[in-house]
């Protein structure tokens, strides 16, 4: 079988978040065929480790889940398409291939296949592992096999979700002067956010560009009623030179005079950013083994979870990150080959 066939096999196993049991079964079964690996399953998370005499341990992690979509793999020349193709079943297939290879290595290696990455962080399978079995995820350095287009994506941005509820006063639409239209007030907030100029931060030589977007809008009572409430959700991507408090304060300052005393602005979710951590020798070596391209991760990844737990980490995996969650999501054979080659050399040197 080719690597594309291996990816197709994984794509064909539906694994939308919270439904990873079937793919975890397959992954665990494949890993248990390798006598040099100790394999443990915690819920729908699968961890395989070598247990030799080497003092250093490298960890390679990937998530099993996908966003909703058609799990039918479609071969397109030297590419395989389908939900999760690049995010991240292409990388998972290579991880499994390299994990079961009994080649001697100068380090111990931990392979982590975890559930529920694509949904709220509180449900993360990686956090479940850290809580229930922290011994399984101890390592000196971690590589997170997110699609990175052949380069290393260092650190990651934080993600902040903010709920804004604007209040008005009901009235008949024939007499709107008797009320206050909350949806019209929401329009001013939307305009303010739409005019936001992204903040650019350089952290350890890596550039991160922050973003702020309105992502949901709700409101309305009836076709003949001036609405007395409108609800917005904002998503803010935060560079790793800021913490939750400073990012939260910046959003409050931006909204400023548009928020009145009766309104609510609530921080609903926060996933912290992580700095590049490229001063870790193993991550610097990873950069040297790739094309030498280093970018800041524009989204949030579990690099931040590893960083929180004292493990320097970086993103590197097969596929074009701009195709993640895209209807044309696909991964090519050359992308898989490149990831496999770099991963093998990184673990061997």
Image: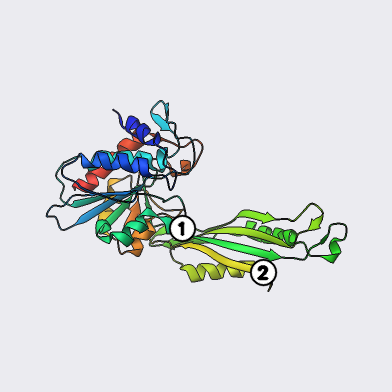
Q: Residue furthest bottom?
A: 261
| Mark 1: few/some/many CA within 10 Å (<14, 14-19, 20+) | many
Q: Could you tell me residue 216's position as x and y percent?
A: 62, 54
CA gap, disc 2 to disc 1? 32 Å
Q: Residue furthest top?
A: 77
Q: Could you tell me residue 329's position as x and y percent?
A: 46, 37
**Secondary structure state at the residue bearing disc 2:** loop
- The quarter of the image holding the N terminus is top left
Viewer-side label of 2, 1: 2
- Please identify the quarter of the rendering in which residue 225 is found: bottom right
Q: Could you tell me residue 140's position as x and y percent?
A: 24, 59
Q: Could you tell me residue 69's position as x and y percent?
A: 49, 38
What residue is rendered at 37% in x and 40% in y? 89
Residue 171 appears left or right of 86? right
| Mark 2: few/some/many CA within 10 Å (<14, 14-19, 20+) | some
Mark seen at residue 22? none
Residue 339 seen in render: no
Q: Which residue is mark 1?
A: 208
**Secondary structure state at the residue bearing disc 1:** strand
Residue 205 appears left or right of 228? left
Q: Which residue is mark 2?
A: 263
User: Please, is residue 286 above or below residue 192 in the view?
Assistant: above
Judge by depth and name the residue closer to the eye, 347 or 40.
40
- How many marks the image carries: the answer is 2
User: Please, is residue 275 above or below residue 60 in the view?
Assistant: below
């Amino acid at each position: 079988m080719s690597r594309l066939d291996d990816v197709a096999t994984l794509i064909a196993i539906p694994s939308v978040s919270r439904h990873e049991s079937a793919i975890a079964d397959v992954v665990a079964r494949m890993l248990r065929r390798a006598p040099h690996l100790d394999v443990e399953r915690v819920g729908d998370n699968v961890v395989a480790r070598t247990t030799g005499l080497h003092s250093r341990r490298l960890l390679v992690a990937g998530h099993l889940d996908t966003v909703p979509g058609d799990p039918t793999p479609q071969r397109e020349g030297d590419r395989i398409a389908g939900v999760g193709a690049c995010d991240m079943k292409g990388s998972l297939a290579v991880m499994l291939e390299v994990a079961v290879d009994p080649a001697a290595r100068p380090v111990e290696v931990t392979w982590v296949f975890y559930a529920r990455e694509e949904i709220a962080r509180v449900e993360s399978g990686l956090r479940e592992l850290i809580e229930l079995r922290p011994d399984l995820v101890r390592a000196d350095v971690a590589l997170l096999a997110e699609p990175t287009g052949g380069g290393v994506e260092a650190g990651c941005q934080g993600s902040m979700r903010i709920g804004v509820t604007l209040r008005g006063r009901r009235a008949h639409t024939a007499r709107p002067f008797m009320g206050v239209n909350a949806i019209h007030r929401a329009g001013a907030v939307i305009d303010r956010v739409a005019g936001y100029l992204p903040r650019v931060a350089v952290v350890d030589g890596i550039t991160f560009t922050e973003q702020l977007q309105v992502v949901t809008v709700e409101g309305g009572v009836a076709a003949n009623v001036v609405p007395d409430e409108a609800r917005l959700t904002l998503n803010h991507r935060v560079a790793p030179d800021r913490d939750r408090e400073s990012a939260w304060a910046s959003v409050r300052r931006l909204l400023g005079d548009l928020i009145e005393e009766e309104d609510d602005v609530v921080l609903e979710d926060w996933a912290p950013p992580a700095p590049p951590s490229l001063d870790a020798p193993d991550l610097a070596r990873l950069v040297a083994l790739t094309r030498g391209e280093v970018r800041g991760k524009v989204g949030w990844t579990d690099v931040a979870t590893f960083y929180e737990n004292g493990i320097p980490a970086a993103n590197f995996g097969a596929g074009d990150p701009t195709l993640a969650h895209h209807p044309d999501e696909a991964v090519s054979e050359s992308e898989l080959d490149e990831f496999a080659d770099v991963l093998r050399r990184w673990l061997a040197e």
